[in-house]
Structure formats: C-alpha cells, structure tokens
Amino acid sequence: MTDRPLPDAVCIGASKCGTTSLHYYLHAHPEIGVPRQKEVHFFLDPGNWRRGVDWYREQFPSGKVRVESFGGGYTHFPMQQGVARRMAEVLPHGKFIYMVRDPVERMLSRYIHNVCECLETAAPAEAFAGEPQGNPYIAESLYFTQLAQYLEFFADDRFHVIEYEDFRHRRRATLSSVFRFLGVDETFWSPAFDVVRHPTAGKRRKTDFGAALHLRFGRHLLGALGRLPVPMPAQRWVTHRSDQALYWLFSRPMERPVLERALRQRLNDIFRPEVAQLEAFTGRRFSHWIADPGAE
C-alpha cells in the first residue's frame, strides 16, 4: 500500500492537438509532477487496470500537483468505452484538460501520422468515409460527444478546454490559464515552452524497410535507452535523438494531401452540430472551423 496521492488532473486529448508538447511543458513547471512515461494507459489498458490503483499512484512523483497526459485514447468513444466511468471511480474529484482544434485539420494530421507510420494506405476520401461514429478519424473529432462521456460523471467546472491555435500562437496566456486551472504559479515561464513537439509540417513517410526495421528493433532499442541510469533530461535527449536518426535514415518526404471541396463540405456538415454544442459548453466561438470552403 502506497501513501502517494492520486493524480489531481488528466489531459484527456484530443490526439494531434498538442498533448505531447503540453506534457513536457507541465513537466517543466516546478510545482507539477508528470509520469516518466507520457501515456500511462491505466484507464484504457486492461492489464494496467488489473494492476490496481496503487500501481497507478506509483507512476507519479510525490509532493506536487500530479497530472497525467494522454494523446487521445481517453477521448476515443465509441472505439474505447468505459474510460470516463473508470475515472469517476478512481478520481471522483479530478480535473480534466481537453485540447481541441479544427476537427477536419485534426483528422488530417492523424491521417498524415498514420500514413507516415505505414498504418494507412487509403486516400483521404476513402479513409474519411462511412458513418461518423464508426470512423475513428471522425469519431475523435466529435469533441462534444467525447466530452459528454465525462459530463455524465463530472461537473462542468472540472474541465478546461484549450484551442490548438491559442496553444500555438498565444502560448504564454494559454499556459497561464492551464496553471491557474491546476492551482499552481501561473506566472512561471521556461525556455522549454518555446519547443514544439511532433509538428505535422515536414513529416516524412517511413519506407517499407524502415517500418519493418522500426517494428522489429526500434521499440526495443528506444526502450533500452529509456532505462539508462542517467537523469531524465539526458535520458529523454538520447532517446529522442536516436529515434530521430532512425526516422530520417529510413523515410522520405511526404506531401500534405489536399482535401477536395466536396469532402471538406461533407465533414463540415458532420461537425457543425458538435461545434455548436462545444461553443455552448465553453462560451467561446469555434465557427471558423466549419466555414464554407468556397469562401476561403
């Protein structure tokens, strides 16, 4: 039995909205503690869930405001179900950070990531087809549908919604609002906050050989590097540089796909009701996300 407190807050997604950068920014704050591994998967992975709450506590440093970050699996309903209920059981007083962006741009960023990792071979029109709830790309961009899973168990004031564009271009004010929400020094600033993690621009697609090599050996190598008996900053630097070297050696540049106007309009029509609900929930405007593509 451990006496470590449970996390105070969880960043629940969405993926491709800056969650990795936020994780490292939170780690830089002296009053915030994050796990050594960004995504603990406690509420998602049945194996980790069976390890129990004490195992989950041990993933976080003591004596700080503890925050878990997750890139999207916690807001991937209906592909992943029961996450909010499990959080309500373990973290009944938890706070939640939810990062959002133009839903179509988020889909496209995820698509580019999947293509680069050799996880997607279909063209965008095919990859984005089908019923919204049954398409993983679309479902994760149904932001209010994802929030609704949590609102069954938690009050509205337990949520802090961040727009990706604010996070990119008004980072100081945005991080101050996050720190204020978490109850830590909101004036803190670090040079680490100027570093952007995992940008979509300049993405490269792994070659078939590179993908096979990474699948067969890459994770083992990076895992071994991550266990080096050195301070965490040095460990992260070595792991990051090694991953970059493998990536560049066995990849080629990828052009950003352009969506046809009809496809963009169809997706805008799908997201329009969700955007209206998110606006009502936050009191903020997001209608620019779903502007008529012909007006651009």
Image (cartoon, helix red, strand yellow):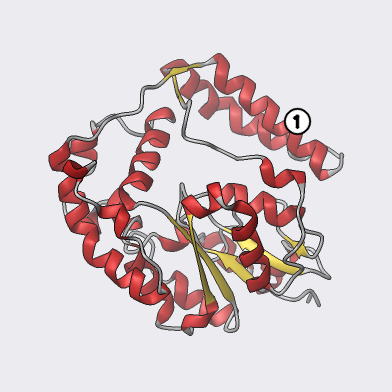
Residue at horizontal 19%, vertical 57%?
270
User: Is any atom of residue 53 visible in this view?
Assistant: yes
Q: Which residue is mark 1?
A: 238
Q: Residue at x 62, y 66 (%)?
A: 177
In the image, what residue occupies the spot 69% across and 27% down? 241
Res 9 quadrant in image: bottom right
Give residue 51's position: percent from left, percent from top: 63, 66
Q: How many tags in the picture?
A: 1
Query: Which residue is rendered at x = 41% and y = 53% of the image?
Result: 101
| Residue 228 at x, y percent in the picture | 81, 37
Q: Residue furthest left?
A: 262
- Nearest to the observer: residue 74 or residue 228: 74
Q: Decide if residue 149 is in sight here.
A: no
User: Residue 166 vs residue 7: left or right?
Assistant: left
User: Tag 1, which secondary structure?
Assistant: helix
- Expressed as whole percent of the image width and height from the top left, the position of residue 148 reads 36, 75
Vertically, is 115 above or below 101?
above
Q: Please, which residue is most extreme toward the right here?
A: 230
Task: Give the left or right position of residue 213, taking residue 125 as reference.
Answer: right
Crowding at dot 1, Cα within 10 Å, few <14 / some 14-19 / many 20+, comes out as some
Q: Nearer the viewer, residue 71 or 6?
A: 71
Quarter the C terminus occupies: top left
Quadrant for the N terminus, please: bottom right
Q: Amino acid at mark 1?
A: Val
Say if 201 sits above or below 175 in the image.
above
Up/down of 294 relative to 15, above or below? above
Task: Specify whether 176 is left or right of 14.
Answer: right
- Percent x, y for residue 4? 79, 74
